[in-house]
């Protein structure tokens, strides 16, 4: 009887955590759904805003096209769903934080707060950088390099897939400081080691810029320079996540 009772007592915390996880996931889904319903009326306007960088660079008289009957309806809805998730990120991170916070020590909680805030802001900055800085240059370059006699008529669904891919790529690239802090905190590396590897980081930044941008030096540099600057910021911030007693990174409990 005692053994059976011990097994029951051991499984209760697990069941409690699973129930809490289910409740928080359900709240996240409901929150995103509510945001989506609030935005769905403006679906076409949202798509017009996202398409503006390309439309502004198209030749006179050129327009975007839809190659499927249902594309003009579903593509703006798809974009609205992505925007709903995008705007819900702070709430989603809060739910994730509320779930894992009880398992953290007070010192770890103080260190996690800046990481959650900075990761959200940096992702938004990466998306804004892609939209306001990269897209005008990219689309101006692409529309001016098309062969003579080729009409530019981009499918709205293909354009959306391209834009979302770039948004995600730049949002993740701007998370470099957070990634560095986590690596130092986990003991994988140290700020001193990262400084020694600075030349390789610079080369890697330009390599990433070459992959994610059109083959022109300006676009590649516009992405590589922010990555290099964010790397330096991450190395500086990582000092606060390194143990001062023995100069060893903090160990996450």
Image: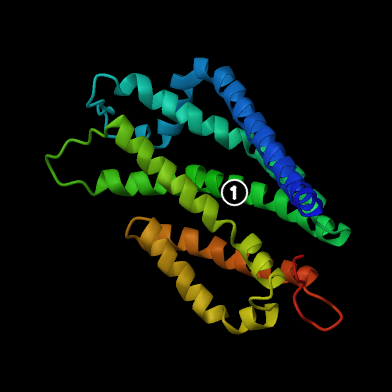
Q: Is residue 34 above or below residue 230?
A: above
**Residue 224 rendering spot, x and y as whole percentages:** 49, 64
How many residues crowd mark 1 within 10 Å: few (<14), some (14–19), many (20+)? many
Residue 151 falls left or right of residue 174: left
Residue 104 falls left or right of residue 66: right
Query: Residue placed farthest to the left in the image?
Result: 149
Q: Is residue 209 above or below residue 154?
A: below
**Residue 201 rendering spot, x and y as whole percentages:** 52, 74
Which quadrant: the C terminus?
A: bottom right
The residue under label 1 is 123
Residue at 51%, 74% in the rendered image: 202
- How many badges with numbers are in the image? 1
Residue at 59%, 57% in the rendered image: 175
**Residue 143 rendering spot, x and y as whole percentages:** 28, 43
Q: Is residue 57 visible?
A: no
Residue at 37%, 26% in the rendered image: 75
Residue at 75%, 46% in the rendered image: 8
Residue 27 falls left or right of residue 159: right
Query: Residue placed farthest to the top in the image?
Result: 41
Q: Is residue 149 above or below residue 101?
A: above
Query: Residue placed farthest to the front in the image?
Result: 1
**Residue 134 rendering spot, x and y as whole percentages:** 45, 49
The image's colour scheme reads rainbow
Q: Is residue 22 above or below residue 6?
A: above
Q: Is residue 127 visible?
A: yes
SS assignment at label 1: helix
Give 179 or 58, whichever is nearer the viewer: 179
């Amino acid at each position: 009887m005692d053994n059976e009772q011990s097994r029951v007592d051991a499984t209760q915390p697990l069941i409690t955590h699973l129930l809490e996880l289910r409740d928080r996931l359900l709240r996240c889904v409901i929150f995103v759904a509510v945001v989506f319903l609030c935005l769905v009326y403006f679906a076409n306007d949202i798509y017009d805003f996202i398409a503006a960088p390309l439309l502004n660079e198209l030749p006179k008289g050129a327009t975007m096209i839809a190659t499927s009957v249902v594309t003009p309806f579903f593509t703006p809805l798809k974009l609205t769903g992505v925007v709903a998730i995008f705007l819900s990120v702070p709430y989603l991170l809060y739910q994730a934080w509320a779930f894992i916070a009880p398992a953290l020590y007070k010192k770890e909680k103080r260190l996690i707060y800046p990481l959650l805030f900075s990761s959200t802001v940096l992702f938004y900055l990466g998306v804004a950088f892609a939209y306001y800085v990269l897209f005008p240059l990219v689309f101006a370059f692409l529309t001016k390099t098309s062969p003579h006699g080729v009409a530019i008529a981009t499918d709205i669904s293909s354009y959306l897939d391209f834009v979302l891919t770039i948004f995600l790529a730049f949002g993740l690239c701007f998370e470099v400081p957070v990634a560095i802090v986590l690596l130092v905190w986990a003991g994988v590396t140290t700020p001193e080691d990262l400084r020694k590897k600075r030349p390789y980081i610079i080369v890697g930044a330009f390599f990433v810029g070459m992959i994610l941008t059109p083959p022109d030096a300006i676009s590649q540099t516009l992405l590589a320079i922010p990555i290099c600057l964010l790397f330096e910021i991450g190395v500086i911030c990582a000092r606060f996540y390194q143990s001062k007693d023995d100069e060893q990174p903090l160990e996450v409990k």
